[in-house]
Amino acid sequence: MLAFEDVTRRFRGGDGVTGLSFQVEPGEIVALIGLNGAGKTTLMRLALGMLRPQQGMVRVFGEPLDDLPAGAWGQVGALVEMPLAYPELTVRENLRISSLLRGSTPGIVEGAVDAWRLGPVADRRFRQLSLGNRQRVGLAAALQHDPRLIVLDEPSNALDPASAILLREQVTRRAQAGAAVLISSHHLDEVARIADRVLLINAGRLIGQLDTTGHDLERAFFERIRADDEHRRTDEEASR
Ligand SMILES: Nc1ncnc2c1ncn2[C@@H]1O[C@H](COP(=O)(O)OP(=O)(O)OP(=O)(O)O)[C@@H](O)[C@H]1O
């Protein structure tokens, strides 16, 4: 469903991501974790064609992104950075537009309002919503059309515990229906609950997977990051 083949995208100043290779298969939830600035959002933007690789290739539904027919994006659901919405339109109107843009029928909107418990704010303008409610609208818009590929960058940001549970249920339900899910998070315990695999990203590189069956996930995470930092420092010193 989603494949990265040796993908590199560096920014002026040297940061970015380097040599990323991984796949997300149908029915699989893959989580991406790393420290601030590790490259998670850059990877997500590359997956969605919001950034182009300088090297390597991204494939969606088996096609290189450049060859993907425009209609195929209707089977993708994504939330990266801020939810995109028209501030002067209501929640319901925004969800309706979002469904039309993805080639779905507006009939799905009421289901999304119910699923995300947006009823009490459905007729409020988007700009009047709290941060958490905006995030819920963004998630409803990303998932209401039952996409086959889901890309969510730190989706539990600003969500209250009840909404975080909703998110978990919705994402798991979509994966059980065969969707491929890529999700980034800072919450290790949340990730451990839903992900089939957890990829570790550090300083723009994928450095392996985290075993989520262990007890002290945080310690395991930080040890892997520290070991990678040390390894890179030694390599840099040796190459001087
Ligand atoms: N447009 C850009 N121009 C220059 N540098 C950038 C740009 N976008 C990202 N970077 C840099 O690339 C690196 C990776 O950033 P990215 O936003 O992907 O990290 P992240 O893992 O999502 O971080 P966070 O957890 O803080 O959201 C950072 O050092 C960032 O400053």
Image: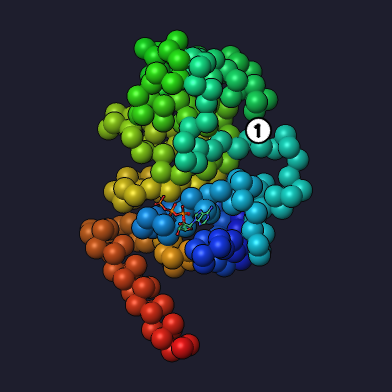
* Residue 16 in view in this figure: yes
Q: Position of residue 133 (x, y in %)?
A: 38, 25
Q: Position of residue 237 (x, y in %)?
A: 41, 86
Identify the residue at image location x=39%, y=14%: 121
Residue 57 found in image quarter: bottom right
Identify the residue at image location x=67%, y=46%: 61
Q: Residue furthest front?
A: 13
Name the residue type under label 1.
Gly
Q: Residues within 10 Å of mark 1 (few under 14, many from 20)?
A: some
Residue 202 found in image quarter: bottom left
Q: Position of residue 148 (x, y in %)?
A: 59, 38
**Observer-nearest residue: 201 or 89?**
89
Identify the residue at image location x=64%, y=58%: 53
Q: Position of residue 86 (x, y in %)?
A: 53, 22
Identify the residue at image location x=39%, y=18%: 128
Q: Which residue is mark 1?
A: 74
Residue 37 vs 123, above or below: the answer is below
* Residue 114 in view in this figure: no
Answer left or right for 42 relative to 163: right
Residue 115 vs 210, above or below: the answer is above
Answer left or right for 63 relative to 183: right
Disc 1 is placed on an element classified as helix
Residue 154 vs 229, above or below: the answer is above
